[in-house]
Amino acid sequence: MNIDTNTIFSMTEANQNFSMVARTVDQYGTAIIFKNNKPRYEIRVFDDTETDETCLLYTSPSPRDKR
């Protein structure tokens, strides 16, 4: 996996300045967020024209929803 060094952000940097991460994604198409000096998250542009991939959103159950 090749990562452009212009698209790397630490978790702290991404939390403090997410708009800079978003601008980088707009410019380069992706950004990588490192956690504990390891690549942990990839942020990509969500393109409506991508039909060959399925986007799934998973949310864990809320602790308040104990039924």
Image: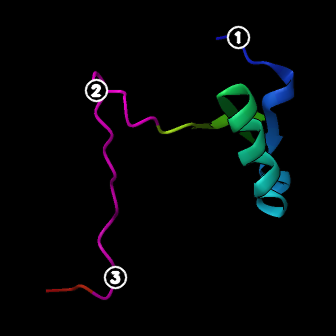
Q: Residues within 10 Å of mark 2 (few under 14, many from 20)?
A: few
The front one of 58 and 24 is: 24
**Res. 30 image quadrant:** top right
Amino acid carrying label 2: it is: Thr
Q: Nearer the viewer, mark 2 or mark 3?
A: 2
Look at discs 1 and 3 and give the one toward the viewer.
1
Instruction: Decide if residue 32 is in sight here.
Output: no
Across and down, in percent, residue 9 comes to: 81, 40
Give the mark, 1 or 2, whose residue is nearer the N terminus. Answer: 1
| Farthest residue, direction left | 67
Q: Secondary structure at mark 2?
A: loop
- Residue 62 position in % (x across, y down): 33, 78
Range of the magenta residues?
47-64
Instruction: Read off the residue under disc 3.
Output: 63
Gap in Å between the C-alphas at discs 2 and 3? 34 Å
Q: Residue at x 72, y 40 (%)?
A: 33
Q: Which of the 4 image quadrants contains residue 29?
A: top right
| CB within 8 Å, label 2 to label 3 | no
Q: For mark 1, what is the residue?
A: 2
Give the mark nearer the N terminus: 1 vs 3.
Answer: 1
Q: Earlier in the sequence, mark 2 or mark 3?
A: 2
- Colour logic: rainbow
Label of residue 19 in the image: none
Which amino acid type is shown beneath numbered disc 1?
Asn
Residue visible at 31% across and 88% down?
64
The structure residue drawn at horizontal position 77% and vertical position 51%, both measured from the top left corner, is 11
- Residue annotated with mark 2: 51
Give the left or right position of residue 34, taking residue 64 as reference: right
